[in-house]
Image: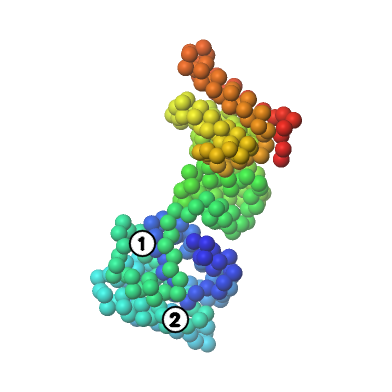
Amino acid sequence: MSSFDAWLGRREPLPTSIYLSGGDEAAKAEVLSALKGRWAEERPDVPPVVLRAAETGVDRVLAEAQGASLFVPASYVIVLNVEEWTRSARTVEAAAEGAAAVPPGNVLLFVESAAENERKTLVPLSAACALRVAVEAPPPEVLSRWAERRLVRSGVKAGPGVIEAVLDASRLETSEVMNEIEKLADWAADTHTVTREEAERVLRPVHSGSLSALSRAVAEGRADQAVDHLLRALEAGESEGTVLFQLQTLVAGALRMRTQQWGWIRDRENSDRLARSRGATELSAALDLLYRTERAWKSGRADVETLLVRAVVGVAEARGEERRA
């Protein structure tokens, strides 16, 4: 995906032929949208031609992709559902031969729908293309870039932490990320800006039920929002034990990072945030608070929800002289 970003980021010219496959259809839709956007900026005078393999012969596709004239100086041809050609090996071979002969300046893009198994008949076609992209679930850093790019295309500027809030709300699923981005873009259509606090209000209740969001709020010292995330997580059916384990591993991981001890760190990103804002003494005290919370809960000395609220506030607000940015 990183090499493909070079084309999307305009650091390299578009290749003459691209084969797009993979199991994440929402990610493929985003790739197609980004490619269309780049083409529109570079060649606003040449609209893309979108064809479906089941309705179009190879001759028509190649005529569109290889042709050029005084009136049509370039072409961008998209062929959807290319797996429809697998019924004929000769059709696939002809398409492969044609893909290798697309002239510079033109782009021929084949899109294969998701499938459980590889369609071996299409291998010669994908191999003939200048660029092959298999789109699976993108990692968080790629999703972040895509989400921010989508907001920019919508004319909206995201403030610090907005994209992270979207990723928390969407559980890193491409379709949900883009749906939430569209929601924010519609909401911010008048102001053209959105802050993290505004995003979290718009993204509820999905965002507020996330344990990752709870950990982030605790790590950033946002006690009120951390309690809100806690209560909504419990309302959504999260068990008290799971919440307490999340908090304990968050703080224990931060203490290991702060004191440079080896050990398992469950939520490295949020533990790192916590480690950068707390000293070792503060983290040790926070971990002791969580262990005392567990003992009080299991001994029945207090209501577990009340104990968890106090623990979340105590960890989120724990700031002392050791704090270092």
Specify the quadrant of the image occupied by residue 324: top right
Look at the image and tell me whether residue 40 can be seen. no
Where does residue 89 sit, x and y in percent of width and height? 26, 75
Which residue is disc 1 drawn over?
Answer: 113
Foreground residue, 141 or 278? 278
Query: Which residue in the protein does label 2 denote?
Result: 102
Q: Residue furthest bottom?
A: 70
From the top left corner, tell me how far across and down residue 98 is, in percent.
38, 81
At x 41%, y 80%, the residue is 100
Mark drawn on residue 59: none
Image quarter where the C terminus lies is top right
> Do the numbered discs 2 and 1 sit on residues whose CB atoms are within 8 Å?
no
Left or right: 216, with 127 as reference point: right
In the foreground, 75 or 305: 305
Label 1 residue SS: loop
Question: Which amino acid type corresponds to the residue marked 2 in the rendered image?
Answer: Val
| SS label for mark 2 | loop
Q: Is residue 22 left or right of residue 183?
A: left
- Say which amino acid is labelled 1: Ser
Q: Which of disc 1 and disc 2 is earlier in sequence?
A: 2
Q: Residue at x 53, y 42 (%)?
A: 168
Residue 311 figure quarter: top right
252 is higher (above) or lower (below) than 295:
below
Give neighbour class at mark 1: few <14, some 14-19, many 20+ (Cα, 10 Å): some
Label 2, label 1: how far apart the Cα atoms are: 23 Å
- 131 relative to 164 in the view: left or right: left
Q: Residue furthest toward the left? A: 87
160, 158: nearer the viewer? 160
At which x and y percent is residue 9? 58, 65
Q: Residue at x 52, y 16 (%)?
A: 296
Q: Residues within 10 Å of mark 2 (few under 14, many from 20)?
A: many
